[in-house]
Amino acid sequence: MAEIVIIGAGPAGISAAELLVANGVKPILIDEGMRAGGQGYRRPADDLALDMTKLMGSEAGRYAALHKRFATLRPRIDYRPQTLVWAIDGKRLHLLRDGRTETLDCDSLLIASGAMDRIAPFPGWTTPGVFTLGGAQVALKDQGCLIGSRVAFLGSSPLLTLAAKQYRAMGAEIAVIADTTPFSAKLAAMPALLGAPRTLLRGLWYMAAALRTGIPMLHGVTPVAVEGDGRVEALALRDGSGRERRFACDAIALGYGLKPETQLADLAGADFAYDRDFRLFLPKIDGFGRARPGLYLAGDGVRIGGADAAEASGALAAHAILSDLGRAQDIAAIRPLARRVTRLRDFQRGLARAFAWPKEQIAALPDTVTLCRCENVTIGEVRAAMTKALGPVEVNRVKAMTRCGMGRCQGRVCGPTLQEIVAAGTEQGGEAAGRLRGQAPVKPIALAAAEEPA
Amino acid sequence: MERSQAQFRRVARRSGPPVTLSFDGRPINATAGDSVLAALLESGAFVRRLEFGVEPRAGFCLMGACQDCWVWSAAGGRIRACTTSVSEGMELFAEPQDMAGSRG
């Protein structure tokens, strides 16, 4: 039997593995995390006294169901937690576990690598106490900690309100929920959101709950600065009417929606295309998640769709894997999965329009703002490099000249902003700025570990 | 004192055994199962200083993606604080110990 490897034990990877097991196949499920579940359905350790039912709210049932399903699945698969896939070379995966490297050859590879927050910098954003919005939730779910006692939520995402609600339930003071997209722009995008009423209603309910509790909620803000020397003391911003306001806080959760983690798909040979709604280069896939022969992509790691879409897309990809290995699949089982994936991903596309990536604000950022937090490169240095560039200006050239995107995060944090700064500088669309190419290792590994045994 | 106040606030207790580690020579009390990052930020405000200056950093994504929270161990190696659990007797530093002062 062919070797089938799944990378990522979130809702997509788990659903794919389940379907393969149901068809008599034993896949290898590799996950960098300590416990299965991925980021959204992250499971705290048993010894942490955290009420996940309260924390997950309306998603508690789905959260519990996924972990129950994984417990049933685990003895039937080759599960390898705390294992990093740091490079992919054709059909060969390079793994790192416990400081040791090994290789694994596979016939079919499903990558369900999940997503991280998309970040836009602003003055002072590297100050300790500024964390990603997803990070604020991880601190709570994984460690039972709040990122601060009085927290400001900034960016553009429906998740700002969700996270603020979770934080408030756990005893945090909410300084402000500040969204850069004007309320009118969100309303204008509403029709596109009616395809997934359950998710839409949940979002509206969170907003209403926030309003009832008197938490200041602002739309159409422009971030001005993080105030504080070495730690967060306040968030300064201009509100929708242009008035500058200051919110005292000791932590800031920052997030502009989610961004697929596509580095492994890149190394595995997927082709990419620019997506105008998300303003990101995303891997090209067919309706089942096929990227190229033997390579399948599912979940938020390829298209933002949320946990439900991830589950359905993982199952779809598993059907495709089995079908491509010559095993007939039941079309009646496939159709509803495909419909669900399309509907939920269309909804997220609507959200990406409603909670817009603030490209105009980014283009207007001052030169002094740090763009690359790994290599300490400012926006001014990137703009200066573009005026010096010989030949076409594009992101990989700017990266080579400035080291922006070359640091230890491999452009995960600065990439989308670098793309916009380069696009604004060349007065071309985001697409013309080019795509930051992925490089192995996708995460830092010790040089000693990367040396192949002779 | 820049470290007089903690960044993180614990809202859920762990039932595991106590663990003592140190950060820049200062003892830190934690509980088995805590991440190094949570342990350090429950008692302080930063975990490292940027290689390109003295700017403090305290991690950013908390999910092993941004690589902003690597701290130095006594042996000269690096540990990603957000995805590493504490262990008894860990000696950690905000800056590399062997090479401190010799950086370009």
Image: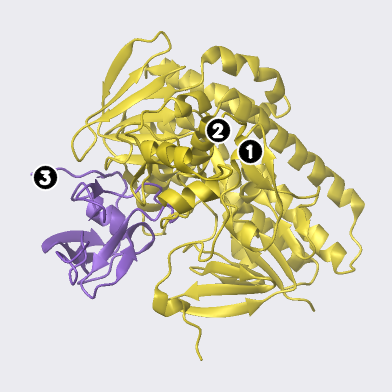
Chain colours: A yellow, B purple
Contact check, label 3 and label 2, Cβ < 8 Å: no
Percent of width and height locating residue A403 = 42, 52
Pick the residue in front: A216 or A395. A395
Pick the residue in front: A449 or A371. A371
Depth-wise, is mark 1 or mark 2 nearer the camera? 2
Contact check, label 1 and label 2, Cβ < 8 Å: yes
- Outermost residue, top side: A241
Q: Please report the residue visible at 47 percent of the width from the left and 39 percent of the height from the top.
A: A386
Depth-wise, is mark 1 or mark 3 nearer the camera? 1
What number is the disc on residue A432? 1
What number is the disc on residue B4? 3
Discs 1 and 3 share one subunit:
no
Quarter of the picture holding the N terminus of chain A: bottom right
Percent of width and height locating residue A263 = 58, 56
Percent of width and height locating residue A362 = 46, 29
Mark 1 and mark 2: Cα distance apart in space = 9 Å
